């Protein structure tokens, strides 16, 4: 990510910044200090159907309230939002989780609302930076982050620097291919990791199987969620166990490829699917350790994210605390 035009040259890290996180279902804002703490945290439903103008106005109102509640001035604003986006120009191009938000000049609007330098970043990339600076990958030189949620996002820090890619949207790790010609993905291809291991698609795979005649304790659950699949698998349901095993196998295989390519010290897994805890982490970590090439296999740790539900705000804050050179 590069600084939003007009935000001025990079300077020493500010003492506190405002983090704004825009999700498809939730807005979250808070003041982030250099120790990664969040002050004045406020969350509210996005109500995305209201359209960008109304939602962004509410976002800014929440931001001003958070600054007042935190009781400390902020020197910059960081924004975390799903892409595609143009971080350099501060423009949301067409985020799938925000239908109708086309070419929204969010950076310019934020500078006008707060009169401060503003930095826009892809949400998963910002979360990777947050986990690297303040969370489960603190101290690592090279790390990979995946969030398993409605979709699958990703980010990487390589040799201590956040990987952003040539156009600022690098790190789309959810769209590595795991089953050529397989399930359709939101990106338009078939067989992407996201099409199998996102919470949405774990549930969809189970639903498809039930409609195809599978016998399961999930028969009476409507709608089926990824959490339902995990719970049924933990209880010994054979159908749910098969869905869950395919999930952990494909995730582990994809991570093995990424570990071989980047040789990170840490792989961090976040997002709602990781609430399954050891049931997800243990088989994935075991597969990576078993199948990754040495010495990467022995050097890497696969862990759960450390920032929890505030990762979006902390990630946005981390971007503003570490403005690009």
Image (spheres, helix red, strand yellow):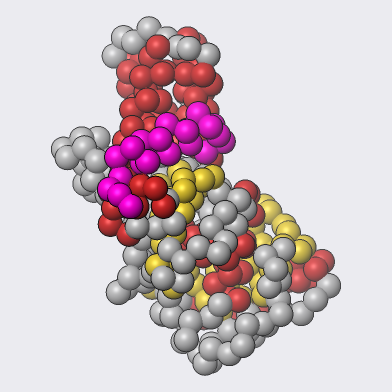
What predominant SS class does the magenta segment belong to?
Answer: helix
Does the magenta portion include 201? Answer: no
Quarter holding the N terminus is bottom left
* Residue 102 image-quadrant placement: bottom left
Position of 83 relative to 164 (above/below): above
Instruction: Specify whether 115 is left or right of 51.
Output: right
Residue positioned 55% across, 49% down in the render: 305
Residue nearest the observer in this picture, 255 or 164: 255
Residue 280 placement (x, y as % from top left): 47, 33
Q: In which quarter of the image is residue 164?
A: bottom left
Q: Where is residue 161 in the image (x, y as percent from the top left)?
A: 44, 73
Tell me what residue is drawn at x 49 percent, y 72 percent: 120
Q: What stretch is highlighted in magenta?
A: 274-295
Q: How many labels does the image show?
A: 0
Q: Where is residue 205 in the image (x, y as percent from the top left)?
A: 34, 26
Looking at the image, which is closer to me, 135 or 6?
A: 135
One can see residue 109 in this view: no
Say if the magenta span includes residue 292: yes
Tell me if residue 247 can be seen. Answer: yes
**Residue drawn at (71%, 80%) of the image:** 15
């Amino acid at each position: 990510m590069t600084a939003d035009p007009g935000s001025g040259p990079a300077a020493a890290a500010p003492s506190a910044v405002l983090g704004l996180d825009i999700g498809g279902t939730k807005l979250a804002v808070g003041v982030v200090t250099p120790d990664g703490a969040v002050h004045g945290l406020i969350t509210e439903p996005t109500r995305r159907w209201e359209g960008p103008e109304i939602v962004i106005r509410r976002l800014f109102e929440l931001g001003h309230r958070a600054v007042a509640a935190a009781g400390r001035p902020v020197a910059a604003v960081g924004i975390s939002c799903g892409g595609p986006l143009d971080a350099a120009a501060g423009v949301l191009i067409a985020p799938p989780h925000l239908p109708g938000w086309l070419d929204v000049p969010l950076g310019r609007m934020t500078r006008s609302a707060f009169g401060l330098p503003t930095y826009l970043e892809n949400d998963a990339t910002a979360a990777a930076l947050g986990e690297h600076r303040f969370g489960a990958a603190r101290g690592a030189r090279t790390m990979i982050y995946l969030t398993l949620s409605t979709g699958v996002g990703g980010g990487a820090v390589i040799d201590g620097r956040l990987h952003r890619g040539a156009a600022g949207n690098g790190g789309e790790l959810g769209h590595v291919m795991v089953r050529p010609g397989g399930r359709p993905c939101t990106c338009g291809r078939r067989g992407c990791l996201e099409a199998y291991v996102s919470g949405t698609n774990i549930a969809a795979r189970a639903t498809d199987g039930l409609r195809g005649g599978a016998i399961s304790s999930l028969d009476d659950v409507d709608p089926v969620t990824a959490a339902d699949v995990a719970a049924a698998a933990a209880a010994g349901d054979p159908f749910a166990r098969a869905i869950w095993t395919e999930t952990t196998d494909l995730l582990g295989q994809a991570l093995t490829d990424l570990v071989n390519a980047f040789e990170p010290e840490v792989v961090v897994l976040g997002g709602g699917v990781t609430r399954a805890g050891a049931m997800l982490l243990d088989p994935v970590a075991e597969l990576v350790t078993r199948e990754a090439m040495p010495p990467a296999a022995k050097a890497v740790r696969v862990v759960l994210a450390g920032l929890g539900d505030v990762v979006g705000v902390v990630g946005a804050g981390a971007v503003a605390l570490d403005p690009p050179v």
